[in-house]
Image: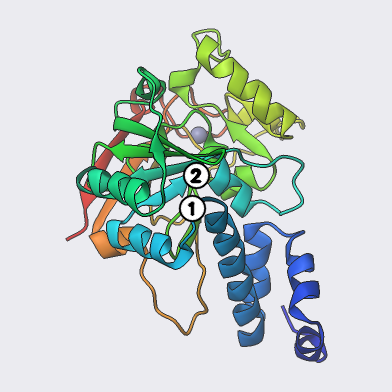
Amino acid sequence: MRLHPHFRDLLSALNHDILFQIMDELNLSDLVALRRMSSRSDELVSAYLDHKFHKLLATFFADVPTARGLMRNTNAVISGSSALAYVLPANISWSPSDLDLYVPNVEFNHVVAYLEVFEDYTDVTQHGLHNHYSAAVLQVTRLEKGGRTIDVIKSASNSALLPLPFFWMTAVINYLSADYAYVGHPELTFQNYALLHPLHVTHFQTPIPRTIPLVQKYTERAFDIRTRNVEWSHLPAAPRHITRDRLGGCSSTVRFFGDEFGLAVSMHPASAVVHDVVVRQQLTIIWRRGGLPCGLGCLARLSDSTAFVEEAWLA
Ligand SMILES: [Zn+2]
């Protein structure tokens, strides 16, 4: 896209408050498009992303720089509704309630101890809390301070990301690390579409009982939640026209954190080279969503549509 000659002047003329208000209307994908226009827009979008992240952390932590440093040093990530709200426009009608902090296996005790000792959180974990999670989660500690709740979630892997692909729907497969925001299914999520994970679907293609309240909650949050891609095809398929594009949400596509389907966005300008958790740890997670073939043109066969998630070392 060619830039209007006055674009740069316009960005300089508007003060930060106005620019940030404009950016509040944009989702993460729009912000990426804006930042690519010039080095000035890259700086402004980075400042906005950093500010938005700081605001989120300040809701839960008295000492934000140290909490962010802890996340960086332990390769912990925020996921769940807080991460989803971060990647959507700021003017959404709902606000996330608590913070879900996913932590590598070996760093779990360290992170919990830090939050108790230095951030004055109290352990209020109730028995059975961890039953809501998949086998990729070993332990959950619920911490509370002044009406704020943090669930610290211990991954079964040295990667905090192992539990994410098991999540009940595609729109929550996102994370915020100390320096990056990641969206697992941008092509669906930014249209407010979401696919249920096959493990959360009955033989009759309806949500399992445990998942029904979640579907209701996120339907109220304007998400259109379905079991297969084909259910969004309102138009009849043209004869002999079969799309063979592989999609990130396809039941047969093998995905990994760092692949071309996900959107990974640095909170820093391009001039600052900062690596995210996967590169720093040389460890990623590969997965297949699984489930029934998506519809006409889908390359999936029942034999290659089993859901799986596993870790993969890069070095
Ligand atoms: Zn497919």
Q: Is residue 25 above or below residue 286?
A: below
Colour setting: rainbow
Residue 74 in sight: yes
The first of marks 2 and 1 along the sequence is 2
Write the residue at 36% across / 28% down.
307
Task: Indicate the position of residue 78 as horizontal and vertical percent values.
Answer: 45, 48
Residue 263 in sight: no
- Out of 288 and 30, give the one closest to the viewer: 30
Quadrant containing the N terminus is bottom right
Residue corresponding to mark 1:
262
Amino acid bearing label 2: Gly
Write the residue at 37% across / 65% down.
69
Mark 2 or 1, closer to the camera: 1
Residue corresponding to mark 2:
248
Label 2 neighbour load within 10 Å: few <14, some 14-19, many 20+ = many
Write the residue at 61% across / 18% down.
213
Helix, strand or loop for disc 1 = loop
- How far apart marks 2 and 1 lie (CA) works out to 8 Å
Q: Is residue 227 above or below residue 186?
A: above
Q: Residue furthest left?
A: 315
Ligand 1 within 8 Å, label 2 CB: no
Helix, strand or loop for disc 2 = loop
Write the residue at 48% across / 53% down.
262
Q: Are marks 2 and 1 in contact (CB under 8 Å)?
A: yes
Q: Is residue 254 above or below residue 261?
A: above
